[in-house]
Amino acid sequence: MVPDDVRKEILAKVREFHALAHGDCPFEAGKTRIPYAGRVYDERDMQEMVNAVLDFWLTLGPYGDAFEEKLKSFLGVSEVILVNSGSSANLVAVSALCSKEIENHLRPGDEVITPAVTFPTTVAPLVQNNLVPVFVDCELGTYNLDASLLDEAVSERTRAVFLAHTLGNPCDMDAIMDFARKHELFVIEDVCDALGSRYDNTAVGTFGDLGTLSFYPAHHITTGEGGAVVTNDERLARVARSVRDWGRECYCTHRTRNPHGECGRRFEFEIRGMSGNYDHRYVYSNIGYNLKPTDIQAALGCAQMEKLLKFIEARKRNFGQLHAGLEEFEEFLMLPTWSEKAEVAWFAYPITVREAAPFLRKELLLWLEEGLIQTRLLFAGNILRQPGYRDIPHRVAGRLTNSDLVMRNSFFIGVYPGLREEHIAYVIDRFGKFFRRL
Ligand SMILES: Cc1ncc(COP(=O)(O)O)c(C=O)c1O
């Protein structure tokens, strides 16, 4: 037997195992859990991962290259840098803009405008890089940064905007990009919840200088843990890759057997202050980290990409069904809104309990959770009220009234592709029963 035959046998067994151990469960009202999100996978996902294990490349290799190519063509970008989480993608993106190798780079004390309702690791890299977040309020309904407040937020120190497309819903990119151009600001888009969403027929994540993705199981595709930085700027991509890879200057893939390196110039680089021609693999031009994923994760990413369009369709369908079913409860609940220019690959379905409602958010959440319907709050709410963030150096533009309301009264439920019509019908019915009890 040759290794290829054994591989085929193993992969056939994986298919068999998947069918036996990971098949579909029938829905039973009140007994089946309705998660807010979750991994959706088939035999191909498991087979590709096993294939990568058998290859035993381990660190980023052929599957990493293939996954990057698939993301590039899906988003229409020229550069994708895989990392090990969405949080790492945010850290790499902000750190890259602080690199001395970038013209007009960000410096300690520079201000970055960002929404107060946010995910913690969208703000953390600003603090970690000694930048000053300037918080603006969010819109109710979209829960995105309110672009009408940008003029109020800008100062002489403002150098960038770091926005997130909340739960997949695109921000007002016309207004934000006009503002950024006018004030010559960098723009980073956190697309961790919005892979596949479009604004004005353009993929979100491709408007700004850099976009960031997460492949945590809750998101549109998964690699277990994982993420990526995307950009159309070759220089920024090179620096982002350096920040990811220990700060290393060399950007060859190091997969060649040529002792002179892939570029053939490994020992030809003269670096100021270093005697001789130091091996370029060991030249560090940035303060870096090691935030790389593995080839096994990338193998899963490749298989997931084949299903992404179907996943997005299912998210839209589930969202539409939920929206139609919950409309009759608008007296109590504020339902989501979106721009006419937005085509939304929804991450989840956000709801705000109206202030005049005769019940507390907690009562509704417990009712849903007791009915096995998972609920989640809108991440950190107003991040400035979180213990770890209360005392960070920051500025607030105007008031954060909506952000506080979101923290008190908003939550979201699932629309992920693992849910079908019967799951959503059950969720709507459970809401109805709550309101009939009032
Ligand atoms: C908007 C946003 N940004 C960043 C992240 C961080 O991604 P990760 O969990 O992959 O670190 C998340 C996580 O869910 C997120 O929702």
Image: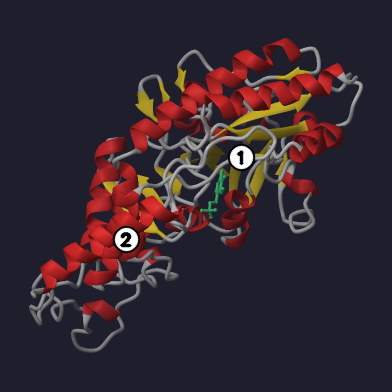
Percent coordinates x, y for residue 341 in the rendering: 45, 16
Identify the amino acid type marked 2.
Met
Q: Secondary structure at mark 1?
A: loop
Percent coordinates x, y for residue 389 in the rendering: 74, 55
- Residue at image position (31%, 60%) is 14
- Residue at image position (88%, 21%) is 437
Quarter of the picture containing the C terminus is: top right
**Crowd tier of the residue under label 2, counting other residues whose Cα lies within 10 Å: few below 14, some 14–19, many 20 or above:** many
Quarter of the picture containing the N terminus is: bottom left
Where 300 falls versus 304 (above or below)?
below
Identify the amino acid type marked 1.
Tyr
Percent coordinates x, y for residue 340 in the rendering: 49, 13
Q: Secondary structure at mark 2?
A: helix
Label at residue 49: 2
Label at residue 178: none
Percent coordinates x, y for residue 329 in the rendering: 75, 14
Q: Quadrant of residue 82?
A: bottom left
Closer to us: 249 or 78:
78
Residue at mark 1? 36
Q: Is residue 235 left or right of residue 265?
A: right
